[in-house]
Image (cartoon, grey):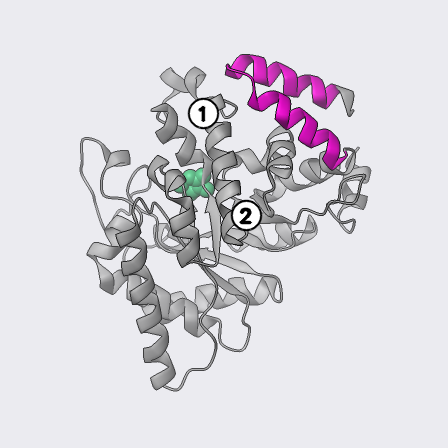
């Protein structure tokens, strides 16, 4: 089986009836890079910038960040690398920037922190833009956006950084900018968000947690964390539709993309890219290559009529058996 998976690396992710779906990877450390390229990743859908921040005892300087980001961009060039601005708070705390709250997942996290600390945001964006000079494969992505004002504010800061760098003599275009859809409010405003950016990317880990009110890290309620809950599937479908209506590509970078069954549903919903851990990539590719897009759409249509997660899961397991 391992040999088969190895041979898969250079084959496209394409269904039996010729529907292409690029598979990207989620990264954080430099060690993820080699593994990702070995698996045939076509890009990076989520580079978690908080990882290098977590490995230090203070905020890395703009120049330190530039070097770290440059290494990532260079390693994957010319493939696109989607860098997410700092997503701390919630379950991710920096030892040198403690946040103490009763409800951290509903508190100060992601874009909320960096908009309150524009100096952190600006240093990061400047470092990303500088790192991109001469490469041009950077994409910037914003986490935990829950309203339009946050997005507008972040866009203003990014554009300002770009203008300032140009005045300082740096070259390079403004990179594509995208927003993560990982809060229920963003699902219902997906079209308004999409109009203002170049791409959307669903963070299904947080989106599932917030839609179902189930802490993603609490084992006591893990049984209630259903990735195939009808509410989750309808939300994912809405976001795909919103992207289609606005003519903007939509991806997904949560764990669901790395689940072969989830990947089949995302394919059928019309997602344009799936981003996952490198280790999940071969299995997802293998599954999609054994299936027709038409069949995936038939199963999606069936599943979208179903009313409980257990029945949906049984139906999807049967599909996996059917397609070997
Ligand atoms: C997500 O929420 O699905 C996601 C990709 O981001 P993270 O897991 O880093 O919160
Ligand atoms: Mg998230």
The relative height of residue 291 versus residue 60 in the rendered view (above or below) is: above
* Position in image of residue 211 (x %, y %): 38, 28
Decide: is 308 above or below 262.
above
At x 34%, y 48%, the residue is 87
Side of 6 where 78 appears, left or right: left
Q: Is residue 313 magenta?
A: yes
**Residue receiving disc 1:** 231
Front residue of 20/77: it is: 20
Q: Which residues are magenta?
A: 292-321
Question: Looking at the image, which residue is at 26% across and 55% down?
Answer: 114
Q: Describe the element under mark 2 as helix, strand or loop.
A: helix
Question: Residue sitting at 32 percent across and 79 percent down?
Answer: 164
The residue that disc 2 covers is: 244
Viewer-side label of 1, 2 = 2
Residue 98 on image: x %, y %? 21, 45
In x, y percent, where is residue 169? Answer: 39, 87
């Amino acid at each position: 089986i391992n040999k088969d998976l190895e041979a898969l690396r250079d084959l496209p992710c394409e269904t039996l009836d010729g529907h292409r779906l690029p598979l990207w990877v989620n990264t954080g450390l430099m060690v993820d890079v080699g593994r990702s390229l070995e698996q045939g990743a076509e890009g990076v859908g989520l580079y978690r910038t908080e990882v290098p921040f977590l490995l230090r005892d203070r905020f890395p300087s703009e120049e330190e960040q530039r070097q770290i980001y440059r290494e990532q961009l260079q390693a994957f060039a010319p493939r696109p690398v989607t860098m997410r601005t700092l997503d701390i708070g919630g379950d991710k705390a920096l030892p040198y920037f403690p946040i103490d709250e009763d409800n951290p997942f509903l508190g100060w996290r992601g874009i909320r922190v960096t908009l309150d600390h524009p100096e952190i945001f600006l240093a990061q964006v400047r470092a990303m833009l500088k790192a991109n000079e001469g490469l041009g494969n950077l994409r910037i992505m914003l986490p935990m956006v829950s309203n339009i004002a946050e997005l507008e504010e972040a866009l203003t800061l990014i554009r300002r950084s770009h203008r300032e760098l140009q005045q300082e003599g740096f070259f390079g275009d403004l990179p594509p900018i995208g927003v993560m859809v990982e809060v229920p409010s963003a699902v219902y405003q997906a079209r308004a968000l999409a109009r203002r950016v170049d791409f959307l990317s669903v963070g299904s880990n947080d989106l599932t947690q917030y839609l179902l009110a189930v802490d993603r890290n609490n084992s006591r309620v893990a049984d209630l964390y259903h990735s195939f809950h009808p509410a989750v599937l309808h939300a994912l479908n809405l976001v795909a539709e919103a992207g289609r209506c606005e003519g903007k590509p939509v991806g997904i970078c949560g764990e669901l993309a790395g689940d072969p069954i989830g990947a089949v549903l995302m394919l059928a919903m019309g997602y344009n890219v799936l981003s996952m851990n490198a280790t999940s990539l071969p299995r997802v590719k293998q599954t999609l290559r054994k299936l027709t897009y038409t069949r995936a759409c038939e199963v999606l249509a069936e599943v979208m009529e179903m009313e409980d997660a257990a029945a949906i899961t049984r139906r999807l397991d049967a599909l996996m058996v059917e397609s070997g």
